[in-house]
Image (cartoon, grey):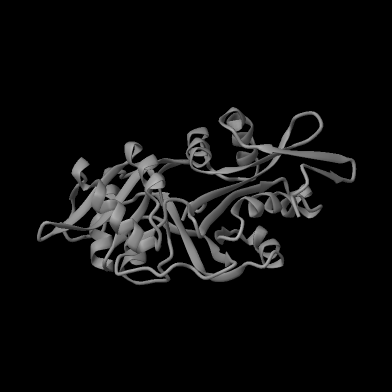
Amino acid sequence: MRASPTLQLNSYQLTAKPITRDAVPLLHELSIGVGWPHRPQDWEVVIDLGTGVVASDEIGRVVGSAMCTILLDELAALGMVITTPKLQELGAGRWMMEHVLETAGDRVKVLNATRAAYRLYIALGFMPRGYVYQHNGYVTGCPEAPALAREMRDEDRAAIHALDAQAFGAAREAVIDRILPMSKGTVIERDGEVVGFALCRQFGRGHVVGPIVAMNDTDAVALTAPHVRAHQGDFLRIDTREPGGTFREFLLGSGLSHYDTVTRMTRDGDLPETGPAVTYALINQALG
């Protein structure tokens, strides 16, 4: 059954239209209204990489959004699902999810659920698979870290693609290529082979470090430390799936407190197999 292009909610009639860059100013207002930090440029990144819907009322006010990014023939990431709280209670969130679920088709679907949206996703058949811990704050210092990393070079691109595919479980070259030009990177090289990388770019209130891909905690800390030192006194964010250990301790020691936790969820199948490289930090919660 196809998702309906309109939805009647009491006195509201909502219309769903494809998301385009033309809607970015209104989408920015929407996300700020619910406390999300995304800048217009951050919206442009997810719009360039995926498809989705924007919901507007009869006088053109944007009141909701949802995005789907096809990562593989068998895998899709869902995100940027936003509604005003009142409309969420009336079923607008479910309606927008029906649109992006239709786009995703039979693929395995992965998303990161906020507390507010968790019950909706459970009702839609998603299953919890783990947690993502959002660390952010103003950098107060940089704990001691091994000097293993060097600056990323253009010739590291292929190795970065390969490592990200190992750690994520799927090749997502278009996603990595979209953020590389706006990122500063560090890599660890051993015996002529790149075995880890971290990318840092402007995002939200300051900068975000992610993805961070490494073979172990020590390497993850070494890759992250140069970015932490470069942003002393600035606002920095890192989203990690690591439940504890040396990497999380390093983030806390840098002034990046544990701000929030979201739930990683899937529907219509399991997450792809990963390894030996590990994703220590996400690109963002919409893309994983």
Residue furthest toward the left?
Answer: 191
Is residue 181 in view from this perspective?
yes
User: At 37% from the left edge and 51% from the top edge, which residue is drawn?
Assistant: 210
User: At 37% from the left edge and 46% from the top edge, which residue is drawn?
Assistant: 176
Nearer the observer, 184 or 271: 271
Nearer the observer, 174 or 261: 174
| Placement of 263 over or under 228, stated as above or below | below
Is residue 226 in view from this perspective?
no
Residue furthest toward the right?
Answer: 11
* Percent coordinates x, y for residue 246 in the rendering: 31, 69
Nearer the observer, 234 or 6: 6
| Placement of 33 over or under 165, stated as above or below | above
- The quarter of the rendered structure image containing the N terminus is bottom right
- In the displayed structure image, the side of residue 90 where residue 200 appears, left or right: left
* Percent coordinates x, y for residue 15 in the rendering: 77, 38
Q: How many marks?
A: 0
User: At 53% from the left edge and 39% from the top edge, which residue is drawn?
Assistant: 47
- In the displayed structure image, the side of residue 91 where residue 186 appears, left or right: left
* Percent coordinates x, y for residue 242 in the rendering: 40, 68
* Percent coordinates x, y for residue 144 in the rendering: 21, 60
